[in-house]
């Protein structure tokens, strides 16, 4: 069906950043004229924009729905989830932030004993339901259907009831200068409240997030306990991580809990 093809084409463009018309024609097995008609429909959605010879992801600050974002960089997110789980010990409590990357840690938490998860992330909540050995504490509040998370005054009040040993956080973008940032005000408020109550903060983000920034910073990069990502950090981030004793875990250099770190 054309509707399914449009959705798949949208995911294809957004996950890669851009695509030529010929690339889309070859990938989806349709004519250039059909591609042009499909692209015209996608342009109306506002998630893509015209560029020379093709289309690219929109740069207008649109927050893509979680149902769409969860299809981006699936293997990278799975790797990040597995790496992040190494930081979690048995019989511990952790916080999982909103976001599709953070929820990928859940299947790997199921391999541990006595882990309790506090979260406002609806996707994480649904995933945790599959694993009876993972305890769940859900923050209430107003549901944002786009981000699939709870936020608002009720959420902020609930956060004040906890001291959080370890928080796994997501970002819209991250900068060595401005730190971790988000594009949604209600989300940024929750993130700020969480990190203020957390002993250790771990960033879970694929490498694409390190080339972006958003308008609402919520935490300094140099205050992170660890960064979990899918490839080595570029020089400005790597230097700042080394200067501040931040653990960096990647598929080629994974963190192991029995290893050494200046912040352990």
Image (spheres, helix red, strand yellow):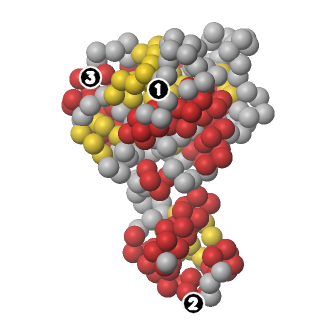
Residue at label 2? 33
Task: Between residue 54 and residue 237, name the one nearer to us.
Answer: 54
Up the image or down, 11 lies above or below 83; here it is below
Q: Is residue 30 visible?
A: yes
Farthest residue to the bottom: give it.
Answer: 33
Q: Is residue 98 visible?
A: no
Up the image or down, 70 lies above or below 1; here it is above
Residue in view at x 55 percent, y 70 percent: 9
Q: Kindly report the distance in space between the C-alpha atoms of the residues bearing marks 1 and 3.
A: 24 Å
Q: Find residue 132 and name its label.
A: 1
* Location of residue 8 (image quadrant): bottom right
Residue in view at x 73 percent, y 13 percent: 259
Task: Between residue 91 and residue 22, name the one nearer to us.
Answer: 91
Q: Is residue 82 left or right of residue 2?
A: right
At label 1, counting other C-alpha atoms closer than 10 Å, the crowd grade (few under 14, some 14-19, many 20 or more) is few
Residue at label 3? 158
Identify the element where label 1 is drawn.
loop
Q: Is residue 165 left or right of residue 80?
A: left
């Amino acid at each position: 069906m054309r509707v399914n093809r449009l959705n798949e084409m949208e995911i294809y463009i957004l996950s890669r950043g851009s695509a030529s018309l010929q690339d889309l024609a070859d990938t989806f097995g349709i004519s250039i004229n059909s591609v042009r008609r499909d692209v015209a429909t996608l342009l109306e959605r506002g998630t893509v924009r015209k560029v020379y010879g093709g289309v690219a992801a929109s740069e207008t600050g649109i927050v893509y729905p979680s149902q769409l974002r969860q299809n981006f960089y699936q293997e990278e997110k799975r790797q990040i989830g597995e790496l992040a789980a190494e930081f979690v010990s048995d019989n511990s409590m952790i916080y999982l932030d909103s976001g599709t990357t953070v929820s990928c840690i859940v299947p790997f938490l199921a391999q541990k004993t006595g882990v309790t998860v506090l979260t406002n992330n609806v996707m994480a909540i649904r995933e945790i339901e599959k694993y009876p050995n993972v305890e769940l504490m859900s923050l209430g509040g107003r549901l944002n259907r786009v981000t699939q998370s709870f936020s608002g005054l009720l959420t902020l009040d609930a956060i004040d009831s906890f001291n959080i040993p370890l928080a796994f956080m997501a970002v819209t973008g991250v900068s060595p200068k401005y730190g971790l940032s988000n594009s949604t005000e209600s989300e940024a408020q929750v993130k700020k409240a969480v990190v203020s109550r957390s002993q250790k903060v771990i960033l879970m983000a694929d490498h694409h997030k390190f080339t972006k920034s958003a308008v609402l910073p919520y935490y300094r990069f140099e205050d992170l306990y660890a960064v979990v990502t899918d490839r080595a950090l570029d020089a400005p981030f790597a230097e700042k991580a080394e200067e501040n004793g931040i653990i960096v875990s990647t598929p080629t250099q994974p963190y192991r809990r029995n290893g050494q770190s200046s912040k352990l």
